[in-house]
Image (cartoon, grey):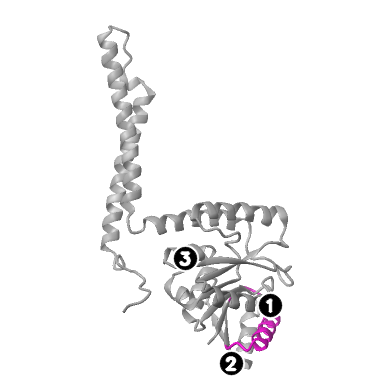
Amino acid sequence: MDISVIISLLNEDESIPELHDWLVQVMTAHNYTYEIIFIDDGSTDNSWTVIQQLAGENPNVRAIKFRRNYGKSAAIHLGFEAAKGDIVITMDADLQDSPDEIPAFVDMMREGNWDLVSGWKKKRFDPVFTKNIPSKLYNWTARRVSGLSLHDFNCGLKAYKLDVVKSIEVYGEMHRYIPVIAQNAGFRRITEKPVLHQKRKYGYSKFGLSRFVNGLLDLLSITFITRFSKKPMHFFGTMGIISGLLGGFIVMWLLGEKLYKLAMHETLREVTDQPLFYIALTAIILGVQLFLTGFLAELVSRSSTDRNHYLVESRI
């Protein structure tokens, strides 16, 4: 099979039939063998009824329904597990992603042998102050932290090799950082492609401003996990040593100052009366706690059943 199209949706019953017909038209025009996987993430409208009807009419349509809303990451991960096509396409169901972009993604994947091609909405039709500007700041931060030079991490339109989607796990709200997860798994041939962003035709956006705060927290989480999940002592131990040494240096300074003033017969101030003493004490305690945290995290990591989970590309 050439292509699997994964579409996660929530209350999009108005746009689903139009999206389905548009996808079928594109697939037929380019003679692709394909499957369309609709994943209903706990919709409360008629989305599931519409999908069931499409699956009954088109044997290339597969339908999955969650009992309740689990989030986009869970839906995408389930779609990845179900996908069978050599190239896997993810896109949103709101018609803001154009199916006409798919052939260019497929050609780019095949000709360049890319592992992942991410869409880039250069020109957006979203509100400037509530979405465009926060999105630019968010993507700039994501580039700096992750080291991936992508302009639009959160674009729903992406293309993957089948090996990529079968090798990674998407959880929480980490769908924004699938390129980062893929890179950490060893798939480093990642690029982007400018895509047309269309105005929303039906319904309304399901994501508010809170997604940018959550996105930043998730970015910090995924960065920590990808860098230190197998070696937590390197992070906590280093921070603990720095904090402990800082506290120790302050204590030595205070003691040295006291001995100097005793020798010079100068007026002494009790060490415990000085704010620096309590700063030093706090730094030492914090250093010990960080070091012990790293030690315990290291024990947990060493005891994990997947501590030696590696992806093997080939064997001879």
Q: Is label 2 in a helix, a strand or a loop?
A: loop
Q: Which of marks 2 and 1 is in front?
A: 1
Image quadrant in which you'd find residue 210: bottom right
Real-space CA distance between mark 3 and mark 2, rounded to the nearest whole angstrom: 35 Å
- Which residue shows up at 29% across the image and 31% down it? 248
Q: Do the residues labelled 3 and 1 touch (CB within 8 Å)?
A: no
Q: Image quadrant for the C terminus?
A: bottom left
Residue 130 lies, in percent from the top left, at 68, 54
- Dot 2 surroundings within 10 Å: few (below 14), some, or many (20 or more)? few
* Residue numbers of the magenta segment: 7-33
Examine the rendered structure and indicate whether residue 314 appears above or below residue 301. below
Q: Is label 3 in a helix, a strand or a loop?
A: loop
Q: Do the residues labelled 2 and 1 touch (CB within 8 Å)?
A: no
Q: Residue tagged by mark 3?
A: 188
- N-term-proximal mark, 3 vs 2: 2
**In this orientation, does residue 8 appear?**
no
Q: Residue tagged by mark 1?
A: 100
Amino acid beneath label 3: Arg
- N-term-proximal mark, 3 vs 1: 1
- Dot 3 surroundings within 10 Å: few (below 14), some, or many (20 or more)? some
Residue 157 lies, in percent from the top left, at 61, 71
Amino acid beneath label 1: Asp
| Relative depth, front residue between 63 and 235 | 235
Relative to 256, is 50 on the left or the right?
right
Amino acid beneath label 2: Pro
- Dot 1 surroundings within 10 Å: few (below 14), some, or many (20 or more)? some
